[in-house]
């Protein structure tokens, strides 16, 4: 996939990197990424992916922009209130980088449509706001053989990991699934959502940007990714901790039961 | 023993970490959680659904039946849902 002169100038700071360069930038241009949710995480994620020159970016979101979103969902603007998030994201990304093809999926991701949605993409990035969607996306990515970058936010905390549960490690052991780390969601209602609990807005920018790095890494291939590692970000005490996790024989996807 | 708490476990307990002398009878993560729950309302609240809070010994995720023998640091981290 060749780059035009204006693309070469646009991506000049990537092209000089040994870890990306021309071949890496061509991989980005050829890649298709599905982003689940254009909220606090999805906003910076979509912006950095578009700026980085991703070929195709799909977005699944059935929500409309509300005034209280704007404290952290920086892809949307004040004039966007009441508009579909897929529409405002499309306009923002077009303005940022017209080379990106944007596909809007203005629907809710469900167990019924999840596998079909992820099928058309190379990498999936989940910035959704509920446990049902997280488990559904991670199962669909396993069944369709897609790498998944998945992140979540608390009030002052974030978590991030990369899942390649459909593949084995070099020693033959399975890579862990999302369910190896979090076998069960908390009972409904016990962990309040952002809407009730509040959230530090800029935290979403930190974790969403880290998601973009992981997506770019999965496409280009450099350094050490987060497969088998969970990054915990605590913006309250400014702690960044990385925890190792492994395949669990009890998991329902690749387990032994 | 250093105990470290994240996200809503940290918020409910009210501190990011602490050094604690553990009683000798505690041999697994599950024992530790049961003992912590008796230390006060804030701990009982943090671990009210103990099965969803995950633990790591020396930064390696373990199951609740894992032995804590030889551990230097135990972290507790729960799933989050915000996006």
Image (cartoon, helix red, strand yellow):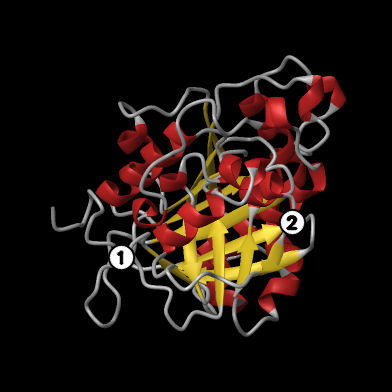
Mark 1 vs mark 2: give the one in front.
2
Left or right side of B70 for A63: right
Same subunit: marks 1 and 2: no
Question: What is the total number of numbered labels drawn onto the structure image?
Answer: 2
- Residue A63's spot in the image, x, y percent? 61, 21
Query: The residue tagged with tag 2: helix, strand or loop?
Result: loop
- Residue B80's spot in the image, x, y percent? 56, 44
How many C-alpha atoms fall within 10 Å of the one at disc 2: few (<14), some, or many (≥20)?
Answer: few
Quarter-of-image position of residue A147: bottom left
* Mark sitting on residue B15: 2
How many C-alpha atoms fall within 10 Å of the one at disc 1: few (<14), some, or many (≥20)?
Answer: many
| Residue under numbered circle 1 | A247
Distance in Å between CA atoms under marks 1 and 2: 31 Å
Q: Does residue B17 sit above or below A185 in this rendering?
A: below
Asked whether disc 1 touches disc 2, contact meaning CB atoms under 8 Å apart, the reply is: no
Give me the residue at 46% from left, 46% from top. Answer: B50
Q: Does residue B47 sit above or below A235 in this rendering?
A: above
Residue extending farthest to the left is A257
- Residue A24 visible in the picture: yes
Between A88 and A248, the one lying in front of the other is A248
């Amino acid at each position: 996939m060749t780059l035009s002169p204006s693309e070469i100038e646009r991506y000049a700071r990537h092209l000089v990197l040994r870890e990306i360069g021309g071949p890496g930038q061509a991989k980005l241009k050829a890649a298709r990424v599905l982003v689940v949710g254009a909220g606090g995480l999805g906003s910076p994620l979509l912006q950095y992916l578009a700026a980085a020159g991703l070929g195709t970016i799909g977005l699944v979101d059935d929500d409309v922009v509300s005034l209280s979103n704007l404290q952290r969902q920086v892809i949307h603007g004040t004039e966007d209130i009441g508009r579909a998030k897929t529409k405002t994201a499309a306009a923002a990304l077009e303005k940022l980088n017209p080379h990106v093809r944007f596909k809007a999926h203005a629907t809710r991701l469900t167990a019924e449509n999840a596998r079909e949605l992820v099928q058309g993409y190379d990498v999936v990035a989940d910035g959704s706001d509920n446990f049902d969607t997280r488990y559904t996306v991670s199962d669909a990515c396993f069944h369709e053989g897609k790498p998944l970058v998945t992140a979540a936010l608390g009030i002052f905390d974030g978590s991030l990991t990369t899942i390649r549960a459909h593949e084995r490690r070099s020693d033959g052991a399975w890579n862990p699934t999302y369910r190896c780390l979090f076998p069960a969601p908390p009972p409904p209602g016990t962990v309040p959502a952002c809407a009730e609990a509040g959230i530090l807005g800029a935290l979403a920018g930190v974790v969403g940007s880290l998601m973009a790095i992981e997506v770019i890494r999965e496409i280009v291939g450099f350094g050490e990714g987060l497969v088998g590692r969970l990054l915990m970000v605590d913006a309250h005490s400014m702690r960044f901790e990385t925890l190792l996790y492994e395949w669990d024989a009890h998991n329902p996807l690749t387990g032994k039961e | 023993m250093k105990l470290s708490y994240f996200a809503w476990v940290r918020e409910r307990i009210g501190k990011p970490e602490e050094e604690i002398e553990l009683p000798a009878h505690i041999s697994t993560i599950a024992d530790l959680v049961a003992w912590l729950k008796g230390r006060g309302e804030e701990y009982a609240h943090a671990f009210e659904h103990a099965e969803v809070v995950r633990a790591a010994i020396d930064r390696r995720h373990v199951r609740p039946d894992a032995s804590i023998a030889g551990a230097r640091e135990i972290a507790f981290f729960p799933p989050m849902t915000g996006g």
